[in-house]
Image (spheres, grey):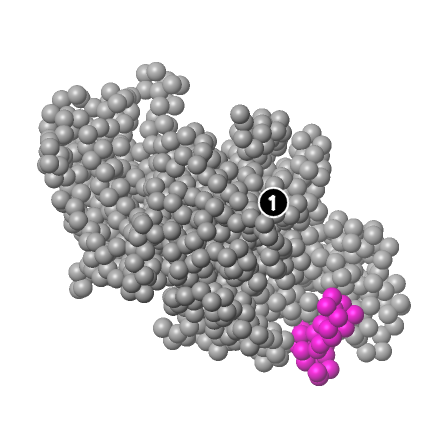
Amino acid sequence: MKGFSEDIEEAQSHDSERFENPFSEYNAKRMSIGQIIDYWCSPFSILKPKIGDEKRIFKEKQPMLFMGGRGSGKTMFLRYFSYEVQRDMMLRKMTNNPSEKSIIDQFKENGGLGLYLTMDSPSLETYKGCDIPDAQWNHIFIHDFELHVCKLYLDMISDLFSRGQLNKKFELKFIPRFSRMLGMKKEASTLEEIKAHIDEELDSVSNYRGRAPFSNEKFNRDRIFEAQYLTYGIPELIKSTIDEFRSDDFNFVLLIDEYENYSEEKQKYINTLIKFHRQGISFRVGMRLEGLHTRATINSSEFLKENRDYTSYVFDDIIDNQREYQRLLSKIARNRLRSVPLFKNHSDIVDILGKEENLEEEALELTKNGKETRHFSLLKVVPNIDVKGTQKVIENSKNPLLEMMNILWIIRGRNKEIVKKAMNDYLTKRKNDLSNKYKSDFINKYKLSLMFLLASQYRKRKRYYSFNTFSYLSSGIIGHFIELCRRSFEIAYYESREHLIIDGKINSSLQDRAAREMARTEIDMIIPIKDYGDRLNNFTKNLGHLFRLYHEDYLLSYPETNQFSIESIPPASSSKNIIEKAIEWSIIQKKSRLQQSSIGGKRDEVYTLSRIYSPNFDITYRTRGGIIERLTAADIEGMCKPTWKPETRLKKSREKSMRKHPESTRRGKHYDYVKDTVNLDHFF
Amino acid sequence: MIQQQIFHMTEINKTQFCEEREFDFLMIAAGSDRRAYEILRKCKQHEISIKKLIVFDFNERRKGLEKKAIKEYKEFESFGYDFSLIDCSIMDPASCLRSQEISALGISSTNTVALDISCFTKPYFFSILKYLKEKAEIGKMNIFYTEPISYVFSKGIYTHYHSTKGFLHYMEIPGYPGLSRGGTRKKILLILLGFDGELSAGLDEDISPNETIAINGFPAYSPIFKDISLMNNEQLLLNIPRHQNLKYVPANNPFEMFNFLEAFKNNYPESFLNIAPLGPKPMALGACLYALSDASTRILYPFPQKYENKISDRCANSWSYSIPLK
């Protein structure tokens, strides 16, 4: 007789026809080997310092640390170089070309092979407590870690053997010596027996962790492995007993992921492995930014030193080369689109999303094709102005953004006739100083800011759409870009299916909705961050609102401000911790180069609020030069509180006047940052 | 392995109680919710004998209670049962179960034991059951559960339900680490959906299993609950690639949950099952019973900075589940 659940399942099976979103899988840990291969796009051309070709991941003796935010592609990167993925790629090659070399020969040609290791945080958290001394837990962890590594080696050897890639004779030497190394009571005669023994040992650790909370028993095994014993011992054994791996140049590479999950004590142990790695074994370690909790090793006088003991690579920095970054995103999207039959004929994401936003069109739409002229009310801030008369002179109903540009010039003290001439000369491409200045201000400086300002005048929101915008919003984190696409496709499939599938297009409002939903979700994900969630949440929101105020300034004194620098803060202070946590979780991003915080100011570390949050605060999605907010430790502390007022800070920190037009306030609050009269000459 | 045929589930009402008429020990969690002592009221009504009432007194709950709530919290004293108060912390079930106070009670396999899970946090009652099975070697026991009429939705029923406050720490429930075999087995995460969507999405993100299965309680205590849980878990459900990965199991029957998990495991014998019991307690109880019978299964749960003081409202039906632990 069928159970209730089975009935439900049967009913569900009839509803199996479902949209296959090409961007639905963005977590590389979940991907199948096939997906890793199909979706792989090499980031080598934009990683800094240059790595060279892919083979260097296997051949390079120096350990490498790969850092990056959640979704930046670290796991994809490490898994791609794992034994299983490389093996399947080789098998594909062999299928396509029967004369291709055998798997083992291809590994030899690569110069090494990688073993991917990940331990999740819930299990790493349990090696403590239960009235058991920390030192004892450390021994148990080391024993368990060594067993994890052993299992990886064993599975790899076993797989190669089962595929006929190893000479059968290897068993005669390898298996008995391996048995002895493991301290097996009865010498094993097959790899299966060794695997069963390792499984038993691994289970014994898990079972102990399960019993420890309720009992006082000690961890007791015939053999407890010490640090390095198997991690280094097995590759040495393999090289000395398996002919295929005998070459001195062949490297076994441990690909350790999610290093930030390891506590300081555990990192000390692995740091020791990294620092004193032996010939024939190296490490590639993936972690969040700030995920290296300590540089210490178990030897109190030895520390990891960058460039001497390891080279580090920051994935998020790939956005510094925007053109290459966009090329990479486009390729990533193409691989995904091609894997779904529905999009076979529409595999260009640039085409689907549109290359760039069309601000003029958006502005026209906002003003109902120029029929609405509410934005001219901004002119009222100029004393004794004839608003209607001025409007008649400077209006251009076909391009409300030019009207906004003209309004800005008028507010800043230009004569209306001169403004009109500047616009006309610019439109008719007549070159002179005035039209050049007009063009430079409009195209290079203010266009996007004017769009934000225009939208705020109509109490509407500027849209976030196009491939270019999404690439900026993603902030160098590939996973963000994939998620923006996934959400856009999901919404478009249900709300504009024909346009998506037949025309291969997603309209701007649907893209905008996806971007806003994602921004909101990302903000929501700050609260659960361990220990710092509440404060980071306030800090992020306050920072976003502060930048938002810059965007609402009708004088556009500091257009598109979204960066800040930090005045020296004490090393072990709570504000320092906040900044480190914000970097670790990619809430803020440190720019790869030092930058002047103001014209003529000293060069400093500069940070940007992750642009993925931009739609939440209606601020720019890109990073321009311009002004950089300079925050002190006290500012940071203050911004971690919900009561902090960005307006108060602006009054203190800005030299130039910033004003918000009373009629433009969406929230109904009227405020002026500077009470004195606008000094119109100040801006020219 | 527990046999699915030998369960027994009885509704406790004015006319019927469970078969057992006396218990050596009844374990309850102190609380100011009406549900906390509903079973004691019914025991009294049916003249059930309880030799020792073990009251888990949570520091976090007791602190900051108002005068009226303190009176409600201490109501267990008024039933006339001999009781032992166990001082404990919600955040750390293991320490409490290792305490002298618990071992001094001398609970053993010869005792008749019952546990009212209504006001225990899930990690607590999971740990207690593990303790009773492994340490006290209890073979069979009764579990009581009182359903709430509703839950407290402070800002509306959709998307604003929070059972926890502050940061979350996804951890193994003490005693349920499972057998990961060096992380080389396929990791499957089964999430029993609750109303707090942030928990499920965060857990799924943190664990990043090879496959995620969402299990919704249906039929639910109230028809709308199944929809609320789907709406609130939208973020998780959007990330589940296949529609088939959303399953339904009755919300008030632990044995259906047990059977579902057993059948699931049979289909994926080589996988490393991770269960996150975020949903209704009877479903969680089913998951607990399953994990007690299959030590290879890991139980995960978000440990928050703080639980909300009041998340449920009044009492609906009370149930007695007769369960085998051996």
Q: Chain of mark 1?
A: B
The structure residue drawn at horizontal position 33% and vertical position 28%, both measured from the top left corner, is A87
Front position in the image: B163 or A127: B163
The structure residue drawn at horizontal position 32% and vertical position 65%, both measured from the top left corner, is B101
Q: Residues within 10 Å of mark 1 (few under 14, many from 20)?
A: some
In magenta, the rendered stretch is: A657-684
Q: Is residue A682 left or right of residue B259?
A: right
**Disc 1: which residue:** B220
Magenta stretch encompasses residue A676: yes
Q: Is residue A405 left or right of residue A137?
A: right
The structure residue drawn at horizontal position 18% and vertical position 38%, both measured from the top left corner, is A235
Residue A317 rendering spot, x and y as whole percentages: 44, 53
Front position in the image: A416 or B23: B23
Magenta stretch encompasses residue B214: no
The structure residue drawn at horizontal position 51% and vertical position 38%, both measured from the top left corner, is B256
Q: Secondary structure at mark 1?
A: loop
